[in-house]
Amino acid sequence: MNCCFDLNTDANTRDQIIFGEDYDESKYLGGTRSFKELSLEQLNKLIDNNYIKKEDAQNASPEIGDFWEFMSNNKHLPYKLGGYTVSTNRVDYRTSIDEIYLNDTSVASKEDVYAFVKFARYADEFNANDDCFRAWWD
C-alpha cells in the first residue's frame, strides 16, 4: 500500500461520501471505522477526490483498481464494497477495501456467477450461492 502521504486529508468530506455524515472521531474505535454498502458511485468519488488510489491494496485483497474495474464491468448488478477508514489522528490515515458482495443473486446470470468466481476465487472467505456472492480478504 502506498500509504497516506499524498492522500486528501479532508476526513469530513471523506466521511460524508462513505457514511453520509461528518467526521466524528468518537466513531473511530482504535482509530478505525468499518463500512459496508459502498457503491461504485461512492468509490468513484473517493478515487476522483484522491481519498483512495487505484493501485492501493489492503493485505491480500485485490487492488482498489481491480474492485473498480470489476464493478464498472458489472454495473447491472448492485455490488457493494466493505472495508474501513483510518482516523486522521493516525499516521496510516487511509481508506481500505477488503470485501465485495452482492446480496440479491436473483438478478445474476450464469455469466455473472462465473465472473464473480473468477474475480474472487482466491479470497480468504468466499461464497457464491443462491443467497449471496461474498468475498473477503484478510
Image (spheres, rainbow, N blue to C red):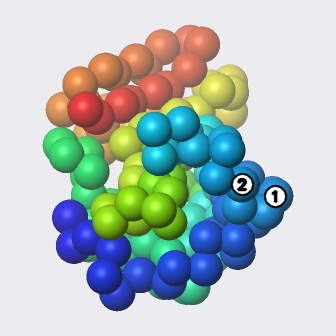
**Amino acid under disc 1:** Glu
Q: Residue at x 31, y 21 (%)?
A: 125
Write down the residue under mark 1. 21
Q: Residue at x 61, y 70 (%)?
A: 11
Task: Write down the quadrant of residue 35 in the picture.
Answer: top right
Number of the label disc, if any, that sits on residue 24: 2
Total labels: the figure holds 2
**Circle 2/circle 1 CB separation < 8 Å:** yes
Where residue 59 sits: x, y (%)?
Answer: 19, 46
The outermost residue toward the right is: 21
Q: Quadrant of the C terminus?
A: top left
**Amino acid under disc 2:** Asp
Task: Write down the quadrant of residue 55 in the picture.
Answer: bottom left
The outermost residue toward the top is: 130
Instruction: Give SS at disc 2.
Output: loop
Q: Is residue 47 left or right of residue 2?
A: right
Q: What is the crowding at mark 2: few (fewer than 14 residues within 10 Å), some, or many (at least 20)?
A: few
**Residue 78 or 56: which is nearer the viewer?**
56
